[in-house]
Amino acid sequence: MPGTSVDFRGRFHVSPPFGWINDPNGFSWYKSEYHLFFQYHPFDSIWGPMHWGHAVSTDLVHWKHLPVALSPTEPYDADGCFSGSAVEKDDFHALIYTGHVDPNPRDASRRREVQCLALGDGIRYTKFSANPVIGPDLLPEDASLADFRDPKVWKEGDDWLCLCASRRKSGEGQLLLFQSLDLERWCLRGTILRGGAWLDGVWECPDYYRMGGRDVLMLSLADASSGQLGKHKSHTAIWSTGRLDREACTFVPERLRELDFGPDFYAPQTVATPDGRRVMIAWMQAWGRSIPTHDLGQGWAGRMTIPREVELVDGNLVQRPVRELERYREGLASGELAFDGLARPTGLGGQILDLEFTLETAGAETVGIKFFVGAEEETLLSWRPDRGELALDRSRGGLPIVALAQGKPDCCPYRAKVETPEGKLFLRVVLDRSSIEVFAGRGEVAMSATVYPRDSSEGIVFFSEGGKARIRFEAWTIL
Ligand code: FRU
C-alpha cells in the first residue's frame, strides 16, 4: 500500500494546505472574485475548533488560499465559528455564521448556538461588536438552543432574509426564517418547514434560491435513517423544488430528491455568478468515515467537489462541472469501439482526467468502466440497463476507508437509478488523483467519491458482462 509520501492531492479541487476542512461556507462573488470559505481546523487533520478558512478564484478551477477569515475568539463563538453564508452590503463583505459554544461535548444540553455577523474587505474580517445578531431570545418555544445553525442569507427588495437549520425539542428538524433591514437587528418570521418521519435526521446547512420560476431548497441530513430516501447512507444532501410562501411563512415541497448518490457529498452551497448561472459546491467527504490522508499522517484531510452548474430541466435539478473546467482540457484521446469482455483503448489513462463517453449495450447485461486500474486495485462504475441502475464501487479502489461507527469497511457499491429512454447512457467522469465525480445523462444523477489508489494505478478499462457493448469516448487531462 502507498506510504506517507504519496501525494493524494488533487490538481483542481480545493483542499487545505494543512489541517482539516469540512463544509463550504460563504460561497460568494465579491470584488470581481469568487470567495470560498470553509470549516477549517488549521492545527490538525481532524475536526477541532472551527475557523473559517478562505480561498479566492476568478475561474472556479484555480484557487488561491488567503489568511483565515474567522477564528473562535469570543465568548459567543468560543468553541467554533460554524457554517454560514456571505453577502455584499454597502461595499462590505458580510459573513453571517454560527457561534458555537460547547462546554462539555458529552452533554449536548449545554451546547448553545447563535448567529453572528462579521464585516470585511475580502481579506480581513471584523466581528460585529453587538454579536450575536440572532440569539436564543428570537427562537420559537419549541426550538432547541443546542442545534440552531448554518444561516443562509439573501436579499429580497429592502429585506434581508435568513434561513437557519433548527431542531425541535422533540427531535425533528425544522427551518426557521428571519428577517432584517440591516443584518444587525433581526426578527423571526416563522417556521417554514418541519421534519418528521417523512424526512428525519438532524437538519443542517440549508440553501435557498429561485430558479426557473421556482423556489429551490437544499438541505443536508445527518443521521437520516428513514423517510423518502431509504436507509443507505448516514449523511446525505437533498434538493426540493417547491413554493416559499412569504406571507404564510411556509415552504411547500413539490419534488424532493437526493443531490448526489455517491458516498462523499455534503453541505452544498450555491452562488449566483455574474453571468447568471447558479453554481454549487459541496464538501467531498462525509462524517463518520476514516480519511487516509489523516491516517497516513500527511497533515491534511478533506476537499471540496468541483463547482457544478445547476439548472432545472423538466422539473429535475441537473448538475455538471462548471464550463470553465473545459478551458483547461489538454491532449484529446478519443475512440469508438464494439467489444465483448474487456476493452483497454490505447492512449486512454491517467489519474487526472475529464472523460465523456456513451455506453450502449449490444446484448450485454452490464456495461461499465474501471478507473484507477492497477495490479491490485480498481474503481468500478457499472450500468445495468435492465434495472436502470448505475453503481459505483470503490471497495477495491485503494487504501481502505472505514465506517468508523461500525469499525468495518465502508459499504459498497453506491447505486442510483438512471433513465435511458434511447438505450444509451451518456456519462461524464472527472478524476482528480484521489476523487471521482460522475454525471449521468444530462446531469440528473451525480455520484461523488474519494478513492486512494497508488499513483501507478492509471489504467482505464471498459467492460461488458453477458454480451457485447459499444462505447464512444473523448477524454482530456486537465492542466
Ligand atoms: C455540517 C456541520 C454544520 C456545522 C459544521 C461544523 O457538516 O455539522 O451543521 O455548522 O458542520 O463544522
Image (tube, rainbow, N blue to C red):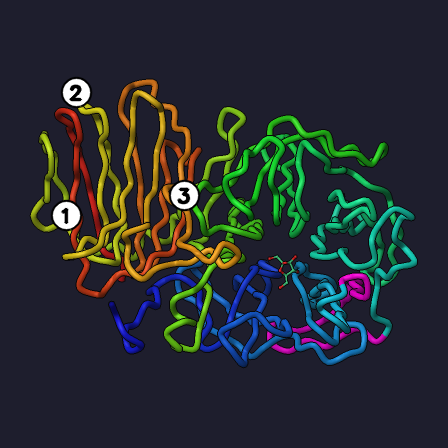
Query: Picture quarter containing residue 180?
Result: bottom right
Answer with left or right where residue 3 lies relative to residue 441: left
Q: Which residue is mark 2?
A: 363
Amino acid type of disc 3?
Met
- In the depicted view, which residue is nearer to us: 333 or 438? 438
Tell me the number on the disc at residue 333: 1
The secondary structure type at the circle numbered 3 is strand
Residue at point 56% right, 60% down? 24
Report crowding for label 2: few under 14, some 14 to 19, many 20 or more residues within 10 A (C-alpha). some
Amino acid type of disc 2?
Gly
Q: Name the residue at the front extreme.
A: 407
Q: Distance of mark 1 from mark 3, alpha carbons?
A: 24 Å
Tell me the number on the disc at residue 447: 3
The verdict on label 2 being within 8 Å of ligand 1 is no
Ligand 1 location (quadrant): bottom right
- In the depicted view, which residue is nearer to us: 389 or 431? 389
From the viewer's perspective, is the residue at label 1 or at label 3 nearer?
3
Residue at point 60% right, 27% down? 255
Circles 2 and 3: CB atoms closer than 8 Å: no
First reached walking from the N terminus: tag 2 or tag 3: 2
Position of 362 relative to 459 (above/below): above
Report crowding for label 1: few under 14, some 14 to 19, many 20 or more residues within 10 A (C-alpha). some
Q: Distance of mark 2 from mark 1, alpha carbons?
A: 26 Å
The secondary structure type at the circle numbered 2 is loop
Residue 411 spot, x, y in % from top left? 41, 47
Residue 187 spot, x, y in % from top left? 89, 52
Check residue 300 for magenta coloring. no
Tally the numbered discs.
3
Report crowding for label 3: few under 14, some 14 to 19, many 20 or more residues within 10 A (C-alpha). many
Highlighted range, magenta: 108-129
Answer with left or right where residue 368 lies relative to residue 18: left
First reached walking from the N terminus: tag 1 or tag 3: 1
